[in-house]
């Protein structure tokens, strides 16, 4: 796995270590790994939201739509 080196001030490293401890992590390294992972997940979610916004409208979510969903559920429960 490739490595990256960060130059931090003492105050930044202290804050990072404190954040790691507060999150129940063993080290600042673990905190940064979690941070990077969360950022990757947010990027995926952001793209999905944008894809949804740009997709065509296939149905209107109105009272009739929700009623049809309730009916499908009721039919599934009876089966």
Image (cartoon, grey):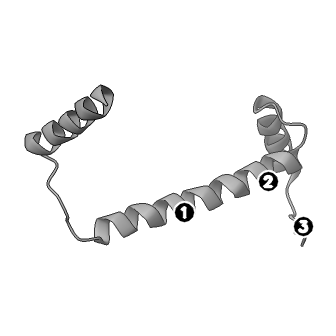
Q: Work out how far the residue at label 3 is from the one at label 2, CA to CA, in angstroms.
A: 13 Å
* Residue extending farthest front: 79
Q: Which one is in front, 44 or 36?
A: 44
Image mark for residue 36: none
Q: Earlier in the sequence, mark 3 or mark 2?
A: 3
The residue positioned 80% from the left and 46% from the top of the image is: 31
Which class describes the residues within 10 Å of circle 2: few (<14), some (14-19), or many (20+)?
A: few
Give left or right: position of 18 versus 48: right
Give left or right: position of 74 versus 31: left
In the picture of the structure, the residue carrying the numbered disc 2 is 33
In the picture of the structure, the residue carrying the numbered disc 1 is 44
Question: Which of the two marks, 2 or 1, is nearer to us in this view?
Answer: 1
Q: Work out how far the residue at label 3 is from the one at label 1, CA to CA, in angstroms.
A: 25 Å
The residue positioned 23% from the left and 38% from the top of the image is: 72
Which class describes the residues within 10 Å of circle 3: few (<14), some (14-19), or many (20+)?
A: few
* Residue extending farthest top: 78
In the picture of the structure, the residue carrying the numbered disc 3 is 5
Say which quarter of the image contains residue 25: top right
């Amino acid at each position: 796995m490739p490595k990256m080196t960060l130059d931090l001030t003492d105050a930044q490293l202290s804050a990072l270590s404190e954040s790691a401890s507060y999150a129940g992590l063993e080290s600042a390294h673990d905190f940064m790994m979690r941070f990077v992972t969360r950022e990757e997940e947010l990027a995926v979610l952001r793209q999905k939201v944008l894809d949804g916004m740009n997709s065509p409208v296939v149905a209107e979510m109105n009272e009739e739509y929700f009623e049809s969903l309730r009916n499908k559920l009721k039919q599934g429960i009876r089966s």
